[in-house]
């Protein structure tokens, strides 16, 4: 083929919307055999290219079918099954969050630090909690059991393991006791097993202390009236505490708060404070012991809540009781009476309210925590040591 007759050979082929143009110029030769030899590699390469593009086309078609099938499978998925999977994933995320949140913190120096709440500003079991680092109620129990067991070991080594079986059992299985309790009774900090449980107790269960309180009704009432007069000068006098309630005002004046005497308040009620020393079963040496004046103004409702333990009986001595006031423990309502004591187990779900008119004035009681009668003397001594206020 001469120089003048040379021409470009153009091969165009299209596969799956792909256009390939190839230009090939044969070598300078006039031999037919040479020309055939020159075209042979071209034919092989062209054949391989077509096969390669065909394979890719099949692969793309398969991928397209897979994606379409997946989308259709999701569309056809049972709604209930899909909802269940989503719920399980959410529960798993929540569980991981709680596990990370409840990890033990730094070593605990005192029981008070163990039982403070990191959610003190929120509501737990419907009850508003305070911001105090010493509040026995504000607790998550994270790491508390190991610390209590350590305290029990120290006490038993110093004294004796005799009579400590029930306390040991309670600390060892505390989480199960608290978490698995029926909702009507669920102490939030410490549960002592095998104690008889009932919402209300008869007055004779702690006869000496009940009679002593009732005999001194007039003394306690007179000292209350002295400290209550301070409200005429300011909205919240020194020594009084305003508790959180959905409606109305709930005021307390503590002489003993979680085993700690409030010196300034005790000096304002000296005879009432001395009376506490004459009570045989008053819990005055551990975190579960309290004594205070409690005032509900008309229209006040205390949200339902649980107490921290079942080792105590809460005693209310009525000082001023207008109409339409009630205490409800474990779903059972009771009314206070002036000059008389009402005994109940505050580890049961309980609430109180004053629905009287403003003209009737506040409801006032003197509250004292007494030992549960079935807690033995050796157990009381050990619990005082384990839950000592400044331990």
Image (spheres, rainbow, N blue to C red):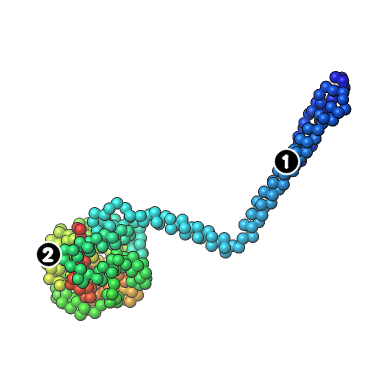
Residue 173 percent coordinates (x, y): 32, 67
Residue 203 percent coordinates (x, y): 21, 79
Residue 51 percent coordinates (x, y): 75, 41
Q: Quadrant of residue 241?
A: bottom left
Query: What residue do we see at 12% from left, 64% from top?
Result: 270
Q: Are marks 2 and 1 in contact (CB under 8 Å)?
A: no
Quadrant including the N terminus: top right
Q: Quadrant of residue 152?
A: bottom left
Query: What residue do we see at 35% from left, 55% from top?
Result: 103
Q: What is the number of callouts on the image?
A: 2
Q: Residues within 10 Å of mark 1 (few under 14, many from 20)?
A: few
In the rendered image, which residue does mark 1 sit on?
A: 52
Q: Nearer the viewer, mark 2 or mark 1?
A: 1
Residue 21 percent coordinates (x, y): 77, 32
Residue 270 numbered tag: 2
Q: Quadrant of residue 175?
A: bottom left
Quadrant including the C terminus: bottom left
Q: Does residue 114 lie above or below 16 as drawn?
A: below
C-alpha distance separating marks 2 and 1: 102 Å
Left or right: 60, with 339 as reference point: right
Give whichever of 198, 28 is nearer the camera: 28
Asked whether residue 214 is in view, the answer is no
């Amino acid at each position: 083929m001469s120089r003048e007759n040379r021409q470009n050979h153009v091969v165009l082929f299209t596969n799956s919307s792909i256009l390939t143009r190839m230009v090939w110029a044969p070598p300078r030769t006039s031999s037919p055999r040479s020309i055939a030899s020159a075209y042979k590699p071209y034919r092989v390469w062209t054949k391989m290219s077509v096969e390669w593009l065909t394979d890719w086309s099949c692969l793309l078609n398969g991928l397209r079918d897979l994606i379409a099938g997946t989308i259709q499978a999701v569309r056809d998925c049972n709604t209930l099954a899909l909802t269940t999977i989503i719920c399980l994933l959410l529960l798993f995320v929540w569980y991981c969050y709680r596990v990370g949140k409840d990890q033990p913190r730094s070593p605990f120096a005192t029981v008070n630090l163990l039982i403070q709440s990191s959610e003190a500003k929120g509501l737990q079991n419907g009850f508003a909690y305070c911001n105090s680092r010493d509040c026995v109620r504000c607790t998550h129990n994270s790491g508390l059991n190991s610390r209590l067991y350590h305290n029990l070991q120290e006490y038993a080594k110093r004294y004796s393991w005799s009579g400590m079986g029930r306390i040991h059992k309670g600390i060892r299985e505390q989480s199960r006791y608290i978490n698995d309790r029926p909702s009507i009774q669920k102490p939030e900090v410490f549960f002592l097993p095998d104690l008889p449980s009932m919402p209300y107790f008869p007055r004779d269960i702690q006869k000496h202390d009940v009679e002593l309180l009732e005999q001194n009704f007039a003394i306690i009432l007179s000292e209350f009236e002295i400290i209550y007069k301070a409200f005429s000068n300011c909205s919240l006098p020194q020594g009084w505490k305003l508790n959180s309630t959905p409606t109305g005002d709930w005021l307390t004046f503590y002489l003993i708060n979680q085993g700690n005497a409030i010196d300034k308040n005790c000096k304002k009620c000296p005879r009432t404070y001395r009376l506490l020393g004459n009570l045989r079963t008053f819990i005055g040496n551990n975190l579960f012991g309290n004594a205070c004046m409690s005032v509900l103004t008309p229209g006040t409702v205390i949200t339902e809540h649980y107490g921290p333990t079942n080792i105590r009986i809460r005693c209310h001595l009525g000082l001023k009781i207008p109409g339409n006031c009630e205490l409800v423990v474990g779903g059972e309502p009771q009314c206070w009476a002036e000059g008389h004591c009402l005994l109940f187990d505050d580890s049961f779900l309980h609430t109180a309210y004053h629905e009287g008119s403003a003209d009737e004035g506040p409801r006032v009681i003197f509250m004292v925590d007494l030992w549960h009668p079935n807690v033995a003397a050796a157990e009381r001594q050990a619990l005082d040591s384990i839950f000592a206020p400044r331990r």
